[in-house]
Image (cartoon, grey):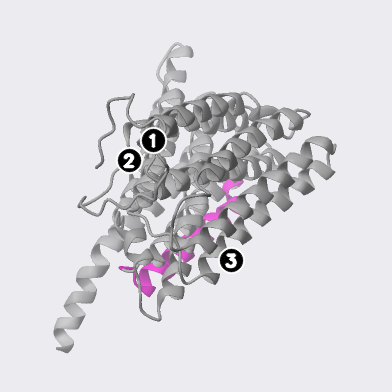
Amino acid sequence: MKTRFPLSRGLGRPLSVYTDEGEAVRHATWLELFFDLVFVVAVAELASHLHGNLTTVEVGHFAAQFLLVWWVWLAYSYYADLYDTTDTFSRLATIVAMFLVIFLSETVTDGLHGGSFAFALAIFLLRLFLTGLYLRARSMDTEARAFHNYWIASDALTTLVWGLSLFVPPPGRYGLWIASFVISIAGVFVVYLGFSEVLVQVSHFPERLGLMTILVLGETIIAVSVGTDLDATLGDVEPMGIVAAAFGFSISVCAWWLYFRHFDEGLIDRLLRVETDDWLRARERGLVYVFSHYFVHAGIVAAGVGVGAAIEATIHHHALAPGGLLALCLGTAAFMLGSGVCHRATPSAIDTVVFRARVGIAALLCSLVFVGELLDPVTLVGVISVIFVVAVVFEEVQPRRRAALTGVRA
């Protein structure tokens, strides 16, 4: 990897696409890891608000706000993946963006509850700052200049529309948020699928997505630990609370296993370098791979909130709130479906049997929303834990079974 220190190096160095192909594998910088950690503060605030307001409506609000926060994180992560940001100016810019993320973290809980202006302002400042960074790169000499200019124009239009929402009260403000988001996503698909010549960087985007997966899994672990700590506040140990925590931890471990069992850190690199007539198909797979991570990450966080709520309900001997039931069942379902789509899109894709199994499991987890209220919280978490364990065992056995059948036929 290119040298990151001393800090004083390259303050006025022109921006360039990261093309140091001398590296076997490109990895995230320490500053990128720090940036992700700061962003998780916003995620933690969303999770904390949902935990304290477990209603059906709030689960929907969480999904929408998480999407907007995750969208900003994705935009900054792509910028850092595309360019060589090891110069001093880029480091200082990242530090400024981190401070803006802290401001965003303070606005998320009221974003859809009377504080939409502050939330919109925080995202606008982050997007405006990122647009400024892109404009700095506009004069960069590249063979894919048309692609580059269209990409920057799309980003600027996205920021402009979002900025207009500051002058429009709700619900019109929310409509402009949706329009800005749609313009952004449509722009990504149009430029990557419409231009044969694109910027080709040495990518570490899968690693960034994987690191965010680890960080949001940490939110689930925190939910388990906080839930078990409640035992001490009751004056004596509640065995079933510990059992519920163990089931919740099992779900986290299985989610980690299912995701990283098929992790491919060189995926984007290979897809960007496809030069045959399959380049369009390759990029389609890459886009599906990236955007399916929303369901992976949002699902993990929501499931963590649901697990924490189930542990508390078990300890206090009351039923799981409808919002907690939704967060737990739909969160785990979103993870299972998102990870299935994500892994199906990779070149070394999971086979059809495994993919269908994940989709079926996601449907089964969704169905628990309708019967979960008939189960006590610890039993519900236990059922979901067993489903996840069965999925892990099935996916470990399936390749061997397929290899054995192939050997017989041979």
Q: Residue at x 75, y 32 (%)?
A: 116
- For the residues labelled 3 and 2, say whether their Cβ atoms are less than 8 Å apart: no
Viewer-nearest residue: 144 or 27? 144
Q: Which residue is mark 2?
A: 28
Task: Residue 311: tell me if it is visible.
Answer: no
**Secondary structure predominantly adopted by residues drawn in magenta:** helix
Instruction: Identify the element where label 2 is drawn.
Output: loop
User: Residue drawn 53% across and 35% down?
Assistant: 305
Q: Nearer the viewer, residue 210 or 229?
A: 210
Reading the image, the residue beneath label 3 is 190
- Which span of residues is magenta-colored? 348-373
The 10 Å Cα crowd at callout 2, few under 14, some 14 to 19, many 20 or more, is: some
Residue 193 lies left or right of residue 342; in this view the side is: right
* Residue 246 picture location, percent across and down: 36, 35
What is the CA distance from the residue labelled 2 to the residue labelled 1? Answer: 6 Å
Q: Residue furthest top?
A: 235
Q: Amino acid at mark 2?
A: Ala
What residue is pinned by disc 1? 32
Identified at 30% across, 54% down, the residue is 265
- Image coordinates of residue 318 in percent, x first then y, are 59, 30
Q: Is residue 405 left or right of residue 301?
A: left
| Residue 183 seen in the current view | yes
Question: In the image, what residue type sits under mark 1?
Answer: Glu
Task: Give the residue at x 43% y 70%.
Answer: 356
Compared with residue 5, is residue 335 higher up or lower down, i.e. above or below? below
Q: Sort mark 3 into few (<14), some (14-19) or many (20+) by Cα contacts within 10 Å.
A: some
Between the residue at mark 3 and the residue at mark 2, the CA separation in whole angstroms equals: 27 Å
Sooner in the amino-acid sequence: mark 3 or mark 2: 2
